[in-house]
Image (cartoon, grey):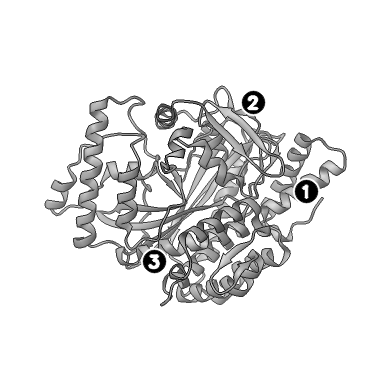
Amino acid sequence: MQTPPLADNGDVGEEVKQTEYSRAHRREYRRKVQQCLDVFETMLNQSSFEFERPLTGMEIECNLVDSAYQPAMTNQTVLEAIADPAYQTELGAYNIEFNVPPRRLPGRAALDLEADVRASLNAAEAKANEHDAHIVMIGILPTLLPEHLTGRWMSESTRYQALNDSIFTARGEDILIDIAGPERLSLQTESIAPESACTSMQLHLQVSPADFAHNWNAAQVLAGPQLAVGANSPYFFGHELWAETRIELFAQATDTRPDELKTQGVRPRVWFGERWIPSIFDLFEENVRYFPSLLPELSDEDPAAELAAGRTPKLAELRLHNGTIYRWNRPVYDVVNGRPHLRVENRVLPAGPTVVDMMANAAFYYGTLRTMSEDDRPLWTKMSFAAAQHNFTESAKHGMDARLYWPGLGEVTPDELVLRELLPMADQGLQRWEVAADVRDRYLGVIEGRAKTGRNGAAWQVSTVHALQGRGLTRPEALAEMLRLYCERMHSNEPVHTWDGL
C-alpha cells in the first residue's frame, strides 16, 4: 500500500492570481477566514481526522552556488534540469526546496530515508553541475552579500511579488535589519530579499486533535535546546552575528510593523507565541484575531456547505492565512485523499550541515517530543512560557554557549542538558516509536558527539573562518574558502562534530 503524501502545508506555496486587492476583496476574505475558522471548530468536535498511522515529513531548503562558491541565481534552470516535482522554487533565485516523501518511524525506516535523501540530493547535484551550480545545505549562505540581492534576485512568481508588496504596504516604510553580535550589522532594505537568505529544515508530525496541544507545547519547550545543538547560521552579509542568525533575520525581514505598532505591542508575524495552549483551535483563532491578511486570495468553496454535504472542506482561506504567520512551531490543517489531518510543523532548525546531521536532528526531535508530550506531569506545567522563549532566543544567539533554564536544574548549559536529560528522553521516545536500537544509536550518537565536543555547524564555520583569516585571507576570501571546505565535508556525510579544521 502506497504511503499517502503529506500535502501542501498551507504555506505560501500555491500560486496566487494577483498582487493587488481591493478593499471589498479584503473584506470578503476576512469574512471567509472567519467562516473557515467556525467550520474548523465544528470539525474538531465532530469530524474524523486521519492519525491512526502517524507520518513524519521533512522539507529541506537549499542554496545554489557557482564554482567560486558565490550565489548562483539560476534556480529555474537547475529545476528544469532536475525535472523532479519533489524539488521546487523558494523565494530567492538562488534557493530551491526539496520535499522529502513522508515516512513512518518504526524499525529501520530512518536508515532507508537517509539513503534515499542522499541519493536524491546527489542526483540533483549532478544535474545542477551541468549548469555550473552546486547545491549547499546551510542555514545562511555565508558568501551572500548585499550586491547579490539587487536586480533579479527573486524567483519568478506572482505569490512572492504579492507577499513582498503586501508586507511593505502594511509597513509603509523600508525595513531595518539590525542584528547585534560580535560584528553588529545594521542596514535598511526596500524589499524582503534578506528573508531569502534563511534556509531551514522543516519537520512535520501528524497528530490527533486530542494530542495536538501536548505535542505543540512540548515542541515549544524543546525549541531552545534543539536550536542550541543544531545552529548553523553564524554569518550574514560578511558579519559574524548570532550562532543561528537565521532566527532574528527572518523575524526582522518579514516584520510588517513600524516602530509605533511595535511600541503598542502588536504581535510580529514571525512569532514564538505567548502562552501554552489547550487546543489547536487556540492557535488558529489567535491567527485570525491578531493578524490582518497579507494574501487575501479567495476560493470558490463554501466550507459550511461542504461540511453539511458530508464532504471535507479544504478551508483554503484559513490555510493560506495561516501560511503567512510564521510560528516557529506552526499548526497545519490539510486534506489528503478526502481525509483531514493535523500536523505540527517544526520550523526551528537550519538546513545542513550533512544528511546524517539532519537525520540526527530529526531523531532527537521526534524522540524527545514523544516522551515530553506523553509525560504525566509535562514540563510546560513546571516552567513559564517566557522561560521557553528566553531559552529559544539565548540558543539562537549563543548556540552551545547558551545558558538555559530547565525545571529541576535551574540554569544549565546545552551540553549538560542534552547529556543528562534530553538524550535519555529521546531514546525512550524513539523506543516508543519502535525505532530499531542501531538506528537510535546512530542518530542520537551524533547529538551526543555535538554535546561532548561543543561543535555544531555554527561553531565549525566560525573557527574555520578565524583560522583562515589568521593565515592572511580577507573576510570574503575566508568565507568562500570555508564554504568550499564545508561542501567537501557535506558530501562526505560525516557528522559535523567530527569535521577537522583546515
Q: List x then y, in percent, for residue 457.
A: 67, 53
Pick whichever of labels 3 and 1 is earlier in the sequence.
Answer: 3
Decide which of 192, 118 is in the foreground and name it.
192
Q: List x then y, in percent, for residue 356.
A: 61, 59
Q: Which residue is mark 1?
A: 464
Pick whichever of labels 2 and 3 is earlier in the sequence.
Answer: 2
Q: Which residue is mark 2?
A: 147
Q: List x then y, in percent, for residue 151.
A: 56, 22
Picture residue at 52% right of the left edge, 53% below the top: 348
Residue 253 in view here: yes
Q: List x then y, in percent, for residue 219.
A: 46, 61
What residue type is disc 3 on?
A: His
Please tell me whether mark 3 sits on a helix, a strand or a loop: helix
What residue type is disc 2 on?
A: Glu
Residue 164 figure quarter: top left
Please tell me whether mark 2 sits on a helix, a strand or a loop: helix
Comparing labels 2 and 3, the label whose residue is closer to the camera = 3
Q: Bin the neighbour count of mark 1 within 10 Å (Cα to Cα): few under 14, some 14-19, many 20 and up.
A: many
Decide which of 447, 129 is in the foreground and name it.
447
Picture residue at 51% right of the left edge, 29% below the top: 154
Q: Which residue is mark 3?
A: 214
How far is disc 3 from disc 1 in space, using C-alphas? 40 Å
How far is disc 2 from disc 1 in space, using C-alphas? 24 Å
Pick whichever of labels 2 and 1 is earlier in the sequence.
Answer: 2
What residue type is disc 1 on?
A: Thr
Decide which of 339, 449 is in the foreground and name it.
449
Q: Bin the neighbour count of mark 2 within 10 Å (Cα to Cα): few under 14, some 14-19, many 20 and up.
A: few
Picture residue at 70% right of the left edge, 35% below the top: 67
Please tell me whether mark 1 sits on a helix, a strand or a loop: helix
Which residue ends up furthest to the top in the rendered image? 151
Comparing labels 3 and 1, the label whose residue is closer to the camera = 3
Q: Is residue 446 above or below residue 145?
A: below
